[in-house]
């Protein structure tokens, strides 16, 4: 097909902000800077496989996994209820769900600081009931809470979309064939909603693995996740080569995850993100 | 009279102030092929959905084998449905779709295999077990939908315009196949259609509905030959509908002409609707006809010619195997027994 001039700005954008940075990332990750100059090596990648860094990777994956699980457990029923609501309530609730996403991500995370603080809102409230202040902040609980809070809408929305697209006739057909409402859910609704679940899991797990703001703010800097590691290498340590190598590993993990989930989205209609 | 399997008593259904069904009473016998026939929006689908349990009647009762089933959810009813758009499960293959109901009933795998195989044979789809639903043609999907419902051995099969999406050829085939299946299996079929020809071909009993009211219940012959009102007459087949006046028993005045007829029991001078089927009008020599006029158009329809004859200040549709040329002066005649006289609608 003949190329149209209208796509050139997009090409320009892609080259400037995706292609060039990615090439630089690959270049830095495969080189080391010595006094003699720049030389190619896999040292940066080798270094990543030291136990110290593998532990960071493991923790990142584990916490992102736990967050995703919580999002799924909270998000699926919410999406289900939302999809079965009457239209007039539906739109209001979706608005309420999306509303926080219009507020800056950092601000929302900062807001949790004041809620979870030792003299924050929650502890003050508990104090009125004579409960000793709990340490809610700067621990793994706070970090996972922050992830779940921030990424929950990304779980609910794709599941909601898929659920509301399920043909009501199919549910009637299942009932007609003798399936109780619960059997109907297990055998028809849930299997048909899997593409949405897969999108939701991708949309939550990917940013959760790579986040560094949440772990920094709510974890108080004592938990290093892979995102923090990259940030440190670039901004504090100044080792761009190692930072690039870690980024490459992260990109690889993300692509791996996507190759699993997008399989669903291609075979079945709807709920796909790309 | 055979005991009725399903009784609908004083059924009404109201959708936010719109009455879909108004005081409907209907008896459905065992092993009957009953068709609900009517234009869209006549309440036939609502009636079917109430029998299936997908809708609750606003008032009235549904009896199955003498027991009130108003409160029984669909999955506990002994009826199965073939849905208008088939509603096959897209995430299952043909085998899994048909086996769905049997798996719910927790039958043994070998029994399920056996029953599904028998069903596939009945609908002529043996060997299609592993096919996905999307890879099937419309007609094949339709057969799977029928198999999926029939495999549960329901006492009543509800069919909601199941042939609507098929092309004419396949439709005719499926009509005969469905009728054969029904006779072979001895199951009550409740069939919905807006196609009068389909209804006439397949049914034991036809229920003609319009605007939520039953217009007439009868055998296809009854409905065709003795329509009770102008709506039934015009809905069942093409016809000439004229207003007339009963002068006395067996005497009708039609467009200023007096005609003998076979109907009686009307008030003298009562205004009536008169139906004359196009095939019952005979084209004769000009001086032999009751009405005279000329041929306005002639269309070849395959078996017959359809001619419009302008006579007695109106146009008549006439079917004849012999064509007449346009503009020709002709006479029209009709046998007394082919004049169908009905009371005005609303008096029924």
Image (cartoon, coloured by chain):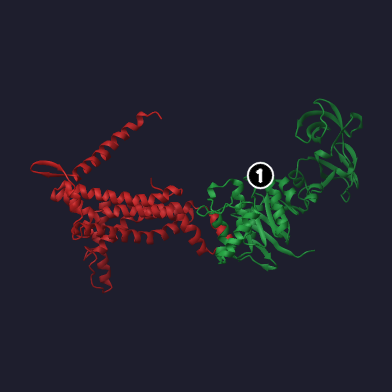
Chain colours: A red, B green
Image position of A32 (left or right of B288): left
Image coordinates for residue A186, horizontal then vertical, percent: 48, 62
> Quarter of the image containing the N terminus of chain B?
bottom right
Q: Is residue B194 visible?
A: no
Front in this rendered view, residue B230 or B114? B114
Residue A90 sits in quarter: bottom left
- Using residue A145 as the reference point, say whether residue A4 is left or right of it: right
Expressed as whole percent of the image width and height from the top left, the position of residue A114 reads: 24, 60
Foreground residue, B61 or A215?
A215
Whether residue A255 appears in this view of the structure is yes
> For the residue carrying disc 1, how many other residues have a C-alpha within 10 Å: few (<14), some (14-19), or many (20+)?
few
Quarter residue A78 falls in: bottom left
Residue B335's x, y, as percent?
Answer: 89, 41
Which chain does the residue under circle 1 lie in? B
Picture mark count:
1
Q: Say which residue appears at 28% left-offset and 49% top-offset.
A: A252
Using the image as rendered, state which of residue A150 and residue A256 is in the foreground.
Answer: A256
| Outermost residue toward the left in this view | A35
Q: Residue furthest bottom?
A: A130
Viewed as shown, does residue A176 lie left or right of A15? right
Q: Residue at x 70, y 67 (%)?
A: B65
Q: Return the residue at label 1.
A: B170
Where disc 1 sits, the SS reads helix
Q: Is residue A139 above or below residue A88?
A: below
Where residue B138 sits: x, y (%)?
59, 46
Dividing the picture into quarters, in which one does residue B55 lie?
Answer: bottom right
**Is residue A122 found left or right of B338 in the rendered image?**
left
């Amino acid at each position: 097909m003949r190329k149209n001039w209208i796509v050139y700005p997009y090409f320009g954008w892609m080259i400037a902000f995706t292609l060039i940075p990615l090439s630089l990332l690959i270049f830095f990750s495969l080189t080391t800077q010595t006094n003699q100059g720049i030389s190619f090596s896999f040292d940066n990648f080798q270094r990543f496989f030291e136990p110290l860094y593998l532990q960071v990777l493991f923790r990142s994956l584990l916490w992102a996994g736990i967050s995703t699980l919580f999002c799924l457990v909270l998000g699926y029923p919410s999406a289900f209820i939302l999809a079965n609501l009457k239209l007039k309530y539906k739109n209001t609730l979706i608005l309420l769900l999306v509303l926080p996403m219009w507020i800056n991500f950092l601000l929302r995370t900062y807001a949790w600081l004041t809620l979870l603080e030792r003299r924050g809102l929650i502890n003050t409230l508990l104090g009125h009931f004579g409960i000793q202040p709990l340490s809610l902040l700067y621990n793994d609980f706070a970090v996972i809470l922050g992830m779940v809070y921030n990424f929950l809408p990304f779980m609910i929305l794709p599941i909601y979309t898929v659920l509301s697209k399920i043909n009501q006739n199919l549910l009637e057909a299942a009932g007609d064939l003798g399936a109780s409402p619960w059997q109907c859910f297990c055998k028809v609704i849930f299997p048909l909603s899997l593409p949405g679940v897969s999108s939701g899991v991708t949309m939550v797990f990917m940013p959760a693995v790579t986040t560094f703001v949440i772990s920094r703010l709510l974890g108080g800097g004592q938990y290093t996740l892979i995102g923090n590691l990259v940030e440190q290498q670039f901004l504090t340590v100044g080792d761009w080569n190692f930072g690039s190598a870690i980024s490459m590993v992260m990109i690889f993990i993300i692509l791996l995850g996507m190759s699993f989930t997008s399989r669903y989205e291609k075979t079945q209609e709807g709920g796909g993100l790309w | 009279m055979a005991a009725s399997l399903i009784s609908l008593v004083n059924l009404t259904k109201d959708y936010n102030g719109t009455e879909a069904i108004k005081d409907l009473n209907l008896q459905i016998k065992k092993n009957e092929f009953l068709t609900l026939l009517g234009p869209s929006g006549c309440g036939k689908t609502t009636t079917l959905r109430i029998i299936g349990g997908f809708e609750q009647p606003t008032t009235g009762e549904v009896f199955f084998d003498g027991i009130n089933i108003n409160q029984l959810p669909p999955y506990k009813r002994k009826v199965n449905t073939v849905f208008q758009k088939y509603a096959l499960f897209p995430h299952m293959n043909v085998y899994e779709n048909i086996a769905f109901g049997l798996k719910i009933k927790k039958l043994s795998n070998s029994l399920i295999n056996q029953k599904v195989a028998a069903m596939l044979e009945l609908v002529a789809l043996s060997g299609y077990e592993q096919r996905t639903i999307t890879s099937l043609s419309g007609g094949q999907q339709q057969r799977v939908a029928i198999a999926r419902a029939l495999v549960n051995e329901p006492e009543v099969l509800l069919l909601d315009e199941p042939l609507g999406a098929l092309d004419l050829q396949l439709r005719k085939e499926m009509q005969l196949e469905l009728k054969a299946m029904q006779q072979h299996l001895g199951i009550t079929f409740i069939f919905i259609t807006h196609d009068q020809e389909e209804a006439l071909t397949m049914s034991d009993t036809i229920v003609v509905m319009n605007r939520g009211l039953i217009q007439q219940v009868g055998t296809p012959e009854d409905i065709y030959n003795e329509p009770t009102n102008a709506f039934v007459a015009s809905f069942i087949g093409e016809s000439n509908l004229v207003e007339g006046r009963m002068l006395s028993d067996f005497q009708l005045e039609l467009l200023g002409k007096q005609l003998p007829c076979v109907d009686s029991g009307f008030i003298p001078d009562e205004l009536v609707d008169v139906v004359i089927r196009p095939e019952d009008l005979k084209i004769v020599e000009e001086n032999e006809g009751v009405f005279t006029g000329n041929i306005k158009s002639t269309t070849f329809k395959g078996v017959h010619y359809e001619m419009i004859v302008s006579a007695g200040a109106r146009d008549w549709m006439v079917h004849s195997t012999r064509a007449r040329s346009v503009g020709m002066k002709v006479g029209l005649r009709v046998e007394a027994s082919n004049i169908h006289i009905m009371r005005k609608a609303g008096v029924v």
